[in-house]
Amino acid sequence: MNINELREHLCETYPDLCPLFSIEFGDGVLAVDADRLLDAATDLKELGFDRLSMVTAVDRPTHLELVYRLYSRSMTAALFIKCNVDREEPRVHSLVGLWPAALWQERETFDMFGIVFEGHPDLRRILLPDDWEGYPLRKDYRDDSVIRRPDYI
Amino acid sequence: MTAEIESDACFANRIEPGVDELVVNVGPSHPSTHGVCRVIVHLDGEIVTKAEPVIGYLHRGIEKMAENRTYLQVVPLTDRLDYVGSMYANWAYCRAVERLAGIQVPERAEYLRVIVCEMQRIASHMMSLGSAAADTGAATMFIYAFDQRERVIEAFEELCGARLTYNYVRPGGVSFDLPEGWTELVLQFCRDHRDGLELIDRLFFGNVIARGRMKHVGVLSAEDAVAWGASGPVARGSGVNWDARKHDPYSVYPRFDFDVPTGSNGDCYDRARVRLFECYESCRIIEQALSQMTPGPIKTPGMPRLLAPRPGDAYDQIESARGTLGVYLVSDGSVRPYRMKVRSPAFCNLALLPMLAEGHTLSDLVVILGSLDPVFGEVDR
């Protein structure tokens, strides 16, 4: 299913999600608010997105942007969900109940960005030691061991 | 990490051992964990009641390091992700860069990428099967499998000068064209490899001990495989017929005739079996690619040394030996990636371990961990 067919299918089934849909670099992107994330994800799962292939975040200058990539085997289509969360107090509902694949990936996102996933059964650091301070993939993270590579260019 | 924190983290906080429960720490540095993985195992007698993988011992912060390098300088870092399958991470990263920067890749380069990645699949599966055999006590088979892998690695050495960290696939093409006589070398390898696979089939899969150790151990249902985000031979062993090369095709894969082997029981035996059959399919793809390939450029002409893609984000994925390997890149218009995320199949597959190991013996845990084929360079990144 190509991206325009996906858009039509989405708009027919869930008209309220339709205005949030856009196309970036050939991929379908659904931009939702943090408080609507769980509802939108539930709808998308019913639409046929059976796989949660990736959970990550990007530290934008003003906010943290959560990125989910869903994949549907029956429609052979991928869809990104993007969700902006507050930088100071990042909280969002966990999707573990829908896709257990989120169990470790949300832990990793918490580990690296400090985003708190409410309802996650086991939210603690996964790659870094439990006593690590700070969230390394945030742009304002400072550490004595991080050396800025000189500009050769 | 200090000793107090260590003991605090693993014993005092989470674990309240009952009278009959024994907590055993497997790893982090133990041959059966295939790298640096620690598993906190709760045992009732010899039966695992709970297994909790502790990862991160090989975390080098590659995603953070990538933010500090130019797009081309990141390629050698991707070699260090999956160190038994470096070509995959090279390619996945380059595909994401090419998508972000709108670079067209010459056809010959696409064929070369397919050939090296299929050879890499053979090398990686031989490593996996060999260590699966070593885990079950069949040390002889380990040598036979590594003999096959060695021939792939020698061919790669001739191609690009490196045995493990190839840095071969670059944005816009590949680094070297085929050396003289390489095609014949690879075709001869494909012929010999089929005989090698027959031998492995008889020696290992026909062995009653190996079958007994792997059949009905660590059963993963197809529904769980999809819901938990498993991919690659782990998902296909459970009967999930999904392979990015076939069902979400990229590069020149639609031009090849090949099958996607799947299992039916979802146990360790089926996962290993799928890997064995994938090696046959890889041989078929290599032979077709070598015969279809035409001379031509191997790099996009006029590729700038400093790429500065327009702001935006791009994701692209390939089918690696472990599953769907994706790279998500965010550009802010500068010469360095704003963010790089590696969607690691080994990481997602390893998350299944607690579920699969429960109810099996401690010795089966080793087999199950081996059948998930984790590579900790990629799990920990």
Image: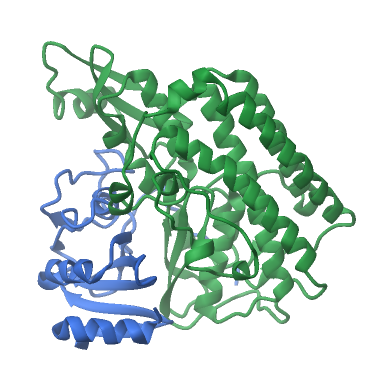
Chain coloured blue: A
Q: Quadrant of residue B133?
A: top right
* Left or right of A113 on screen, residue B100: right
* Left or right of A57 on screen, residue B261: right
In the figure, what tint was chain B given?
green
Which residue: 86% across, 52% down? B184
Name the residue nearer the viewer: B149 or A58: B149
Q: Quadrant of residue B113?
A: bottom right
Percent position of residue B36, x then y: 44, 32
Percent position of residue B319, x then y: 51, 57
Q: Is residue B381 visible?
A: no
Is residue B137 positioned above or below B267 on the image? above
Is residue B351 positioned above or below A97 on the image? above
Which residue: 11% across, 11% down? B19
The coloring applied to the image is by chain
Which residue: 14% across, 45% down? A121
Q: Is residue B135 visible?
A: yes
Number of marks in the rendered image: 0
Percent position of residue B362, x then y: 34, 19
Is residue B211 positioned above or below B222 on the image? above
Which residue: 19% across, 26% down? B8
Name the residue nearer the viewer: B117 or B375: B117
Name the residue nearer the viewer: B353 or B67: B353
- Quadrant (top left/top right/bottom left/bottom right) for the N terminus of chain B: top left
* Residue furthest right as drawn: B180
Q: Quadrant of residue B203?
A: top right
Name the residue nearer the viewer: B209 or A86: B209
Percent position of residue A108, x then y: 29, 51
* Left or right of B371 on screen, residue B222: left
